[in-house]
Image (cartoon, rainbow, N blue to C red):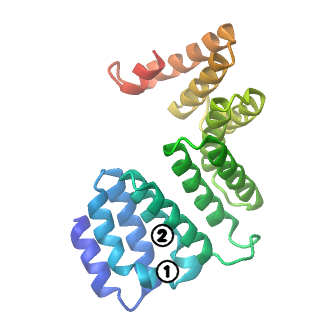
Amino acid sequence: ILRRSAERAQTELAGQPAIQARLLSTLGKAYNNLGLYSEARAAFEPSLPKIERLGPDGVEAVLTLAHTYAQQGQTEKALQTVRQAERMLGPNLKEHPGLRGTAAVEEGRIMIATANVPAGVAAFDRAIAYYRATGDTPPRTLATTLNNQGLLLSDAGRFKEAEAALSESLNILLRVVGPHHLSTGQAWFALAQTAFQAGNMPLAENRIAAALSIERAVLDPDNPILADSL
């Protein structure tokens, strides 16, 4: 179904590049979620020159392709694609803050993959600043970005800053999805990791207990997320 949809998008929507880009972005994300990265590239790459000429309207599709490259381990190509998406947004950094935030998040993920912690922290810093600058960022998007930033800060030994980012992420999730949601449990897990790395074992134990309490209630006993917490 995805392959036929991609083929139709490339042919039937050839004269409507903005609609084509949106559809291909959706298809690319579906392929990526299935781990079908070669198929995602085959869907995207023939239309890439037209998508790049769309400017901001094509950025989401280009960032989906960057994520595909990153998942294939082609980190340099992924980073080059993120840079292309940023150029498509234009030089005015105050325009399109949501898309700039998404681009910075993708860069941060690439930096994590290459173990470049300082660059990853800087990318997530930019992403959060952009997300705060726009009034329509979904709260869970901000919470996830804060969580990623906090884990990187913890890896860098910047525990006070990590605590601040991860605590804000947890508070957002408590407000948006409640105290018994899996995402909330994983936020407790991240805070437990930070306390552990900082050498605060009693706090780490309390936090991992909170994570396990939620995860045991919402996951099957053989779920690997639960195994990670154990």
For residue 122, side relative to residue 221 (left or right): right
Numbered label attached to residue 62: 2
- In the displayed structure, would residue 209 be above or below residue 23? above
Q: Position of residue 26 (x, y in %)?
A: 40, 65
Q: Secondary structure at mark 2?
A: helix
> Which amino acid, by three-letter code, is at mark 1?
Glu
Q: Residue shown at 59%/50% (left/top)?
A: 108
Numbered label attached to residue 187: none
Mark 2 to mark 1: distance in Å?
8 Å
- In the rendered view of the protein, which quadrant contains the N terminus? bottom left
Q: Position of residue 44 (x, y in %)?
A: 35, 72
* Of callouts 2 and 1, the N-terminal one: 1
For the view shown, which residue lies furthest in the top direction? 202
- Which residue was labeled with disc 1? 52
Q: Residue shown at 45%/73% (left/top)?
A: 22
Q: Nearer the viewer, residue 213 or 49?
A: 49
Q: Secondary structure at mark 1?
A: helix
> Which amino acid, by three-letter code, is at mark 2?
Val
- In the displayed structure, would residue 219 be above or below residue 107? above
Circle 1 Cα neighbour tier, 10 Å, few/some/many (<14 / 14–19 / ≥20): many
Q: Position of residue 153 (x, y in %)?
A: 68, 35
Q: Position of residue 98 (x, y in %)?
A: 65, 63
- In the displayed structure, would residue 90 be above or below residue 14? above
Q: Residue shown at 57%/55% (left/top)?
A: 107
For residue 103, side relative to residue 2 (left or right): right
- In the displayed structure, would residue 156 be above or below residue 215? below
- In the rendered view of the protein, which quadrant contains the C terminus? top left
Mark 2 and mark 1 in contact? Answer it, CB < 8 Å: yes
